[in-house]
Each structure stands twice: as structure tokens, then as C-alpha cells.
Amino acid sequence: MMTKKSNLSINFSSRMRSTYSTAIIGSLIMKIGSNNKKNDFIEEKKRQLETELQKGIINPKQDDMINYYNQFFKRWGKTYPVEYQIKTIAKGGRLPQVSVLVDSMFLAELGNRVLTSGHNMDEIQGNLEFDVTEGNERYLKINGKTQVLKKDDIVLKDDQGILASLLYGPAKRTTIDLNTESALFLAWCPYKLNEKTITQHLNQILRNLNQVYPSSPAVLDIHF
């Protein structure tokens, strides 16, 4: 299915459709005007989630969503990074403080265990496509380091190249920063997953942001 909203289209390549035939992607576009460094409501929600994780409300070994993603990551001998993040916070760690947009996304990602990427809409060039790697493709990660990709990873591309990898995370070029005025959040689901689960996850990001930016327009969609 191809969708076109807010002058942005999201497509699946033929290789994506054949390799991951049941993959499903959720998208949320929100225009806020300006990103904030910090917000009291978001900080309170972070402390609440930390307390819940430290009380052991999520058991990573038995969590269905973590096991769902580990089907993908373990093909390359890796572990779903959200599992590590939950374990770190459960031991007394703290959620990072980046910005309202990023923190709102991370809150929902850890709470729901749905892998999510965030992108600065103004830095996206042309249309978006999900594709599968042949191996040895390269891109500049969010930390500024070049990453060589493995065969059969799922990547997001625009007209200028790779914007994110499911295995290795987002590219530097569309990083959300304090100058971001419009953000795209993507829920990456490599195998069949209930659309309601994805929609509820993205709506949680939206509810968090609506507390800070109550009149901001938003578009939520599902792609498969």
C-alpha cells in the first residue's frame, strides 16, 4: 500500500515485499513549530516509567513484544536494543533527556517495546521507501560513524540515500534537534503485527506531545 499525506509518500520496494511479506510500518507526522529542550509533563512521565520498570513490570525474557523483535535481531547474533535499555533502567538507570520530541518517542518505545525512529521532516528529500539490503551498503549513523550494513537488513531510504536501518538505527542527516519544526515517527514491525497495537503505540506518542503542543496538526497512518 502506498500512502500520500502531507506531501510525503511511503512505499515498499519489491525486494521488501518478497523478503518481508508481512512487514507493517506505522507513521505519525506532527508539525509543532519548534522543539523544546525539556518539559515538566514529559519529565514526570519519564520518572513514572522508570519507577514501573524498576518494580519489574516488564520481564524481558517473557515479554511478547521483545521476543517478537528478537526473531529479527537474533538472525545476526544481536539482541533487540530496547531489551538492553529496559534492563539498564530496571537496575536504576535513567531515561535520557534529549528534547521533547525525542523523549516523547522514547517513552512510548520503552513502554510499548515497539521499535520507533524519529526524523526531521524538513531534511527528508523526496519520497520514502522501505527496502532490503544486499549487504555492504553504507550510511552515516546518528553518532557520526559510518555503518556497513548486513544482507537482508531493512532500511528506510529517501531520494538521497539511507535514513535508517532496523539493525543499526537512524542516520545523522534527519536527526531531530531543537530546530525541528515537523517530525516523522515510524514504528518498524518486520513481521505481521496487529494494526491496533501499532496505532495505540503511535497515539501514545501523540498524546504525550499534545500535552505540550495542544493545537499541533498530526497525521497517523499504517503501511503494509
Image: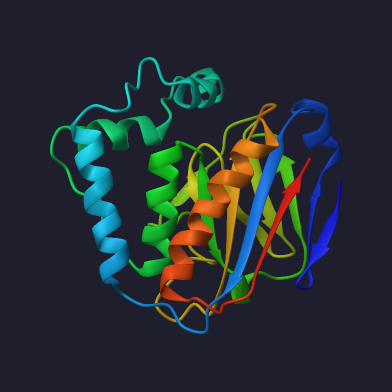
Identify which residue is drawn at 19% across, 41% down.
51
Residue at the top extreme, as displayed: 62
User: Is residue 59 positioned above or below 210 on the image?
Assistant: above
User: Is residue 208 positioned above or below 196 on the image?
Assistant: below
Q: Position of residue 217 (x, y in %)?
A: 63, 75
Which quadrant of the structure image shows residue 37?
bottom left
Q: In which quadrant will I find the C terminus?
A: top right
Lateral position of residue 28 relative to residue 181, left or right: right
User: Is residue 39 positioned above or below 21 on the image?
Assistant: below
Query: Which one is in front, 183 or 209?
Result: 209
Query: Is residue 90 in view from this perspective?
Result: yes
- What's the colour scheme? rainbow
Q: Position of residue 15 (x, y in %)?
A: 81, 35
Lateral position of residue 53 relative to residue 100, left or right: left
Which quadrant of the structure image shows residue 126?
bottom right
Which quadrant of the structure image shows residue 219?
bottom right
Q: Position of residue 189 (x, y in %)?
A: 62, 35
Identify which residue is drawn at 77% across, 27% down.
19
Identify which residue is drawn at 82% across, 43% down.
13
Identify which residue is drawn at 83% across, 57% down.
3
Lateral position of residue 82 relative to residue 94, left or right: right
